[in-house]
């Protein structure tokens, strides 16, 4: 058994220090079920210390020019890009994504965003317009509390922390306790880059303790949370007591509309990929595939054959496409949804409960056909490699089914006519729509409608979430 890594320090005021709590949290390799590290179990007093450090650092950091902040972020970007392989290995062991996918997705995307925010800090016009005798300026909102998830543990940290830093804010971060090691690796880089003390502070721990303390703290001016809709609602309730700004990126149950004039094989093949990315542990996963009712058997057959090629395997194995789920709890959750789909009468075309592994939190590719709108697997976010295929009668019916959800985070439309596909995309009540397999854009605004969240991340829109608007009348 490998030596267990000790990361039981928290990062406050530019130093790794002891938590006020003697407890620790075990970090488990999801492929082997072995404990690989321990991190601090932070408490409320740790949050108080971190917020005080961030508050003390705010005046000097916010007073820097955008170009001066950009220089710090650029140094972090350069150091991080020199350690891509090391970071890839860490995140792959941390949360289970195969190495071949983790490098471009779990590391490549966030490193691109660090560079983008470094550049944006130096070019953004904070004095952006005049309206008659009024000068409208944008100023950093203050101390930001960031609470991040385990499924894209570096990417979600970067979208919050580096946007906030570029804007001139200081940050108190609670990373996921499930897959925290990649965040610690990033903070080591931040420390090496010489970011001024207190500008970034990190307190590990559990959401109901550390997360709630951040959301409730009167000296935190804004809280940005990514996670489940249930937890996001709690963050909003707690934050409301101090009337602080809240940004939420929550769950999804996104629909992929394959219209009657689409290339069915191409659309289904690409749709399976957008459902199974990161073993389905993706908030934007296109988990509801909508196809013309008369072509449902054909679509299900294609999906099952494509899904079989999503090889379940250890993250270190070159041919692996589906690594383990992040934890035993998540594995049991996904299996329970598969059981429920069978019990409610959906047709199980491919059963991911059978995958051949006795160790590790694996679930194989799963395809359900003849799913109806009222079934649990059509309504609730599963967060695993489970695809539900639903038949529709016509275009209006397809749009109705797509919008018949409490969520509105992502979606897809396929058509042989690009103009028709875009017209249908405009009818879907969701924050992002992929048209005919469009590529993800890390600079475009990202966020949801309805119970998928509030606010936007990435690019200029992500930066502006962390700014206040002031009117100066002259």
Image (spheres, rainbow, N blue to C red):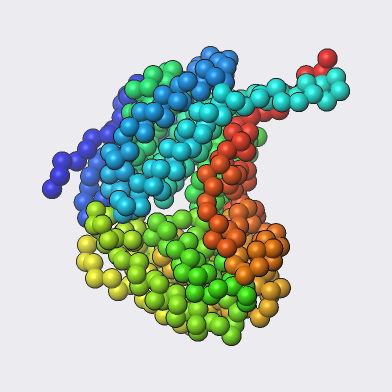
Q: Residue at x 35, y 73 (%)?
A: 308
Residue found at the very far front of the displayed protein: 417
Q: Residue at x 41, y 24 (%)?
A: 75
Q: Residue at x 58, y 76 (%)?
A: 291
Residue found at the very far right of the displayed protein: 132
Compared to 176, does 392 lie above or below? below
Q: Position of residue 135 (x, y in %)?
A: 78, 21
Compared to 281, does 180 lie above or below? above
Compared to 50, does 327 lie above or below? below
Q: Position of residue 424 (x, y in %)?
A: 69, 65
Q: Position of residue 354 (x, y in %)?
A: 30, 74
Q: Is residue 173 visible?
A: yes
Q: Is residue 153 visible?
A: no
Q: Quadrant of residue 320?
A: bottom left
Compared to 276, does 88 lie above or below? above
Could you say which is closer to the camera, residue 95 or residue 77? 77
Q: Residue at x 67, y 61 (%)?
A: 422
In the rendered image, which quarter contains the C terminus? top right
Could you say which is closer to the camera, residue 204 or residue 200? 200
Q: Position of residue 326 (x, y in %)?
A: 34, 54
Residue found at the very far left of the displayed protein: 1
Q: Is residue 182 left or right of residue 70?
A: left
Q: Is residue 78 left or right of residue 264?
A: left
């Amino acid at each position: 058994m490998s030596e267990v890594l000790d990361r039981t320090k928290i990062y406050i005021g530019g130093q790794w220090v002891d938590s006020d709590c003697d407890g620790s949290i075990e970090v488990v390799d999801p492929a082997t079920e072995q404990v690989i590290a321990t991190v601090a179990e932070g408490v409320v007093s740790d949050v108080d210390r971190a917020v005080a450090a961030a508050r003390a650092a705010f005046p000097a950091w916010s007073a820097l020019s955008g170009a001066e902040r950009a220089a710090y972020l650029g140094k972090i970007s350069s150091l991080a890009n020199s350690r891509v392989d090391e970071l890839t290995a860490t995140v792959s062991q941390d949360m289970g994504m195969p190495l071949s996918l983790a490098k471009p997705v779990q590391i490549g995307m966030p490193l691109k965003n660090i560079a983008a925010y470094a550049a944006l800090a130096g070019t953004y016009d904070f004095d952006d317009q005049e309206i008659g005798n009024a000068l409208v300026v944008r100023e950093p909102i203050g101390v930001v509390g960031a609470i991040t998830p385990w499924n894209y543990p570096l990417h979600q940290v970067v979208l919050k922390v580096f946007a906030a830093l570029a804007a001139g804010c200081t940050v108190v971060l609670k990373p996921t306790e499930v897959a925290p090691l990649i965040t610690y690796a990033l903070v080591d880089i931040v420390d090496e880059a010489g970011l001024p003390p207190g500008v970034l502070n990190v307190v590990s721990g559990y959401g109901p303790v550390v997360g709630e303390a951040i959301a409730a703290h009167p000296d935190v001016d804004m809280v940005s949370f990514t996670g489940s809709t249930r937890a996001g609602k709690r963050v909003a309730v707690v934050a409301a007591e101090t009337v602080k700004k809240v940004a939420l990126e929550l769950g999804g149950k996104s629909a992929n509309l394959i219209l009657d004039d689409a290339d069915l094989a191409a659309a289904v093949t690409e749709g399976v990929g957008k459902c199974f990315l990161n073993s389905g542990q993706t908030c934007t996963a296109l988990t509801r595939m909508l196809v013309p009712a008369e072509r449902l058997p054909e679509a299900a057959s294609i999906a099952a054959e494509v899904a079989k090629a999503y090889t379940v395997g250890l993250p270190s194995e070159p041919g692996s496409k589906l690594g383990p789920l992040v934890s035993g709890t998540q594995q049991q959750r996904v299996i329970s949804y598969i059981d429920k789909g069978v019990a409610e009468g959906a047709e199980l075309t491919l059963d991911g409960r059978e995958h051949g592994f006795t160790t590790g939190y694996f679930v194989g590719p799963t395809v359900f056909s003849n799913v109806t709108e009222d079934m649990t697997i059509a309504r609730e976010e599963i967060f695993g490699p489970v695809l539900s295929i639903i038949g529709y009668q016509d275009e209006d019916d397809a749009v109705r089914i797509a919008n018949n959800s409490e969520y509105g985070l992502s979606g897809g439309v396929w058509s042989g006519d690009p103009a028709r596909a875009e017209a249908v995309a405009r009818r879907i009540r969701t924050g992002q729509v992929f048209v005919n397999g469009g590529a993800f854009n890390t600079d475009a605004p990202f966020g949801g409608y309805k119970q998928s969240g509030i606010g936007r991340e990435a690019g200029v829109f992500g930066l502006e979430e962390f700014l206040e608007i002031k009117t100066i009348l002259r």
